[in-house]
Image: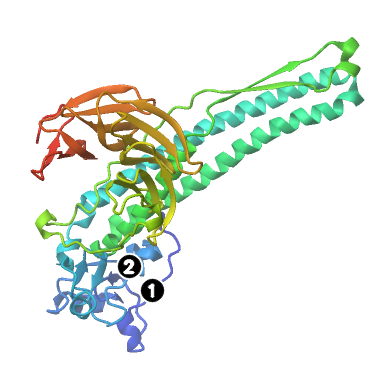
Amino acid sequence: MIQVCNLPKLFCDICMQLNVKRVANVWCSECEEKKCEECEEKHQVQKATRHHNTIAIKDYQLLPDSIANISQECEFHKEKFEFYCQIHYLPLCKRCATGQHKECNALKPLQEIVKSVKESVAFQDIENRVNDGLEIVRKIVKFQHANKTHLEGKHDEFIAEVECVKTIVNNHLDQLKQEILNQLTVHQENTNSVIKNLDEMQSSVVAIGNELAKSKQHASDFQTFLCINEWDSKVQKYETEINAVQYHEGKIELTIELNLIQEKIINAITEFGILGISFSNPERLTLKKVRQGQLFIPTPNLVNRVKLTNIETLRIPKKLKTFPRNIIRGCDMLADGRLLLVDMINKKLMLMELNGTCAKYLNFKTEPYDAAVIENTLVAVTLVERKEVVIIDFNCSEIQRSFPVTHRCFGIVFKDGKFYVCCDHKIVQVLNLSGEILSTLSLVEPATYCSMFNDKLYFATQDSTNEVYCCDFNGNVH
């Protein structure tokens, strides 16, 4: 619930220019002015402003600064924004559109773009993900507080047992007691640290939720639209943190075994006891994230409308070539933007930096075909003739494990913990991280490469027809 209390009085901008001090009662985001009741009456009937939407001044004061400070004018040309560049994600005035962005082929009228943005899939997607993330964080916080209570209870129990034994050999056991309590304290501090981080994460997610709520109620469509990318970036960050924190230890169970052989306690016992700690498998809370992208753009980007722009050219150093040329069969991108390239003829897997230089490479004894990033620097590579998929850690340049497939294998993609491998005989085999074949999809044509999008499998044919098929997980072509 948004609380309205002790909001300062704001005065009419127009009247202030005439040295008259009148309290403002509305805000016009298009004029970017506060208006009193008298000025607002004129504002509503003048031809140039009669269609402007205004909000109550108290609602304007509730907007976050990041939204309220968004200007309707170009900071360079002081002209009103009229277009939006879908390539650079920027609002443009007429001079920007005909100047710096004249080569951009994806300019849209701004009013067309921001229309109904609060009802768009993109806005609803972020709103749902914020609520989903907040719900999961709250569950994890509750779980960790239960751990904290359990630790505190066990702490008291252990102290009582220690004090009982301490009466027998008090001086000798003081030091040993402290050692075991230090172990317990470390786990308590770790749990408190997790809870503190979760509390901070919860506050941040709540803040985003409040911004969304305020924006939905009071911000203009234009202001809301320009904040979507920023919200999306923040939400992505917290989703990553939420997923990461769920891999923390599960529920903590503490036990202690005390050595009570009193006749040998001085000479034989070198520690007070063994602190037994066990962790249950934590409940895996899955985010309901379904990325919708820029789905509020009113016109589809068809393939024949796409204009490709060369961003970077990567050149393979001559020293990496066994043969005069390269055959780059496969590629994938790491989370930090670096590229993995599979050079089939030179039997190499290369890691390319953002500036186009080769950071590292690995040699194979047989021909690799394609690669798929699993996480960080863990990569899966298909070896065609060996009918095998190998898992490689690029950090240590070692093969972690390998597993066979039933036929020669080509393209590979990794999604949701599963490998999808294109094989001979018109099939795609689905495997888990252990190499177990979960299912086999029969295709209408033999496939070289495949990709996943919106629960559909897309694959390119091996022949020269230059065709790409879309099918479901039963192999039915759509």
Residue toward you, 37 or 314: 314
Q: How many marks?
A: 2
* Vertical placement of residue 375 versus 36, above or below: above
Q: Residue at x 55, y 29 (%)?
A: 146
Is residue 209 in view from this perspective? no
Check disc 2 and give the amino acid type. Answer: Ile
Q: From the viewer's perspective, tell me whether residue 295 is left or right of residue 286.
A: left
Q: Where does the image place residue 32, in percent across and percent down from the top left?
A: 29, 75
Q: Where does the image place residue 137, in percent across and percent down from the top left?
A: 45, 39
Q: Residue at x 31, y 84 (%)?
A: 15
Describe the element under mark 2 as helix, strand or loop.
Answer: helix
Instruction: Report the residue marked by disc 2.
Output: 57
Is residue 162 in view from this perspective? yes
Q: From the viewer's perspective, tell me whether residue 84 is left or right of residue 346.
A: left
Tell me the quarter of the picture where residue 369 sits: top left
Badges 2 and 1: C-beta atoms under 8 Å apart?
yes
Q: Where does the image place residue 199, in percent across and percent down from the top left?
A: 52, 44
Check disc 1 and give the amino acid type. Answer: Leu
* Vertical placement of residue 395 versus 86, above or below: above
Tell me the quarter of the picture where residue 72 sits: bottom left
Instruction: Report the residue marked by disc 1.
Output: 10
Would you call the spot at circle 1 few (<14 residues within 10 Å), some (14-19), or many (20 or more)?
some
Q: Where does the image place residue 13, in percent across and percent down from the top left?
A: 33, 80
Q: Residue furthest front?
A: 323
Would you call the spot at circle 2 few (<14 residues within 10 Å), some (14-19), or many (20 or more)?
many
Q: Residue at x 43, y 69 (%)?
A: 8
Label disc, if present, on residue 196 of the rendered structure: none
Residue toward you, 319 or 236: 319
Residue toward you, 28 or 231: 231
In which quadrant will I find the C terminus?
A: top left
